[in-house]
Image (tube, rainbow, N blue to C red):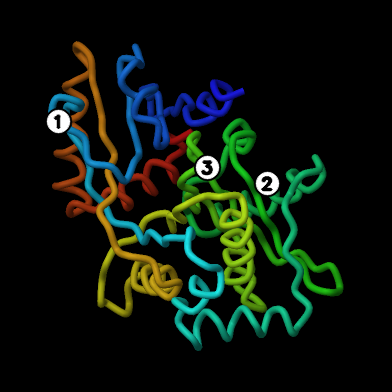
Amino acid sequence: GLWREREKMQRLKKVAFLTINDIWFDSELYEISNSSIVALHTNDELGKESYNFRLITQTFLLNISEDIDKIFAKFDYKSARYAINKAIREGVVVKKAIEKKELEQYMEFQKTFCKEKGIPVLGEEELENLTCYYAVTKENEYLGGCAFVESSDRKTVRYKYGATLHKLNANEIILWEAIKDYHKAGFSFFDFGGCVYTEDKESYYYRHYHFKKKFGGDLIDSYTYFKFRGIYRMFYYVFELIVKLLFKGDVNGFVNWLNQKGMLK
C-alpha cells in the first residue's frame, strides 16, 4: 500500500563508521525519523527549524505533465532528438528490467562500470527500491541501463544511476523511453539527478552538465538536509572542514573518494 511506497523512500546508508537514515523526497518521513543522523534529498526548500545544515546543489528538472510532443520539442535537436531517432533507426530497444535475470544483468554491468569510473556502486538492497531500464541492440548486445527513484506521491522521478557503453546513443534513448512511461503514468516532473555547472571543457562535470542540459529541463537548486542528534553534531563540522580544505569545496569529489576507499556503502 501507500506506506510500503513511502518506506521505499528511505534506507540506511553507511559512511565510514556512521549510519545515516537516507530519505528521498518524503519530508514527513524525515520529520518523524528518530535516527541519530537523518538526511533528506528534495527539491523543496524547508524552514531553518527543520535541519542542522543543508547542502545546496543543482539539477535539471523537466516538466513532463505537458503534451509528449511538446516535451520532445524541448530537447536539443542535434544532441538529443537526432540521437534518439538515430538509435531507433538502428534498432536499439529499451526494456524495463522486471525479471530477476534482467536485474542481475544490470547489477553486474553497473558494478563493472562504476569500478572503472571510480564512482559509488549501486547496492543490491537499494536496487529493490528503484526502477531500472536497459537497452540492447537488435543483435541483443547489452548497451547498459539506468535506474530511477520515484517519489511516494508519484509526482517526481529522479534519474539516480546510469551505466552504459556510450554506444548507439543508449543513454539518450533510455531516458526518452523512461520519460514517456512516467508521463503516461501521470508523473509531473523528471529530475535528471544533479549536475555541477562549469564551462571548463577539461572537467568531467562539463560533459556531465551538458548531457543533462540538452533535455530541456530548468536548472534549479536541489537540497540535502541533515539533522544530527547529540554528539553526532560534531561530525558535520569535521565533514565541512575536510571538504573545504582537502577537496576545495567539491562534495561530489569527497563522496567519490569515500567510495574508492571502501567507506561508502
Where disc 1 sits, the SS reads: helix
Query: Residue 186's spot in the image, x, y percent?
Result: 56, 50
Q: Amino acid at mark 1?
A: Tyr
Circle 2 SS class:
helix
Rendered location of residue 146, percent (x, y): 60, 56
Indicate the position of residue 216 as horizontal and vertical percent values.
41, 72
Q: Which numbered marker is on residue 199?
A: none
Earlier in the chain: of badge 1 and badge 2, it is 2
Q: Residue furthest front?
A: 67
Q: Is residue 105 above or below residue 38?
A: below
- Tell whether 206 sits left or right of 149: left
Residue at 55%, 48% (x, y): give it: 148
In the image, is 115 to the left or to the right of 104?
left
Q: Nearer the viewer, mark 1 or mark 3?
A: 3
Which numbered circle lies on residue 150?
Answer: 3
* Left or right position of 32 against 131: left
Tell me if mark 3 has few (under 14), some (14-19) or many (20+) residues whose alpha carbon lies within 10 angstroms of its own. Answer: many
- Residue denoted by label 2: 107
Could you classify mark 1 by the number of other residues whose Cα lies within 10 Å: few (under 14), some (14-19), or many (20 or more)?
Answer: few
Q: Which amino acid type is marked by label 2?
A: Met
Label 3 residue SS: strand
- Look at the numbered discs 1 and 2 and tell me whether their residues touch, using CB distance below 8 Å: no
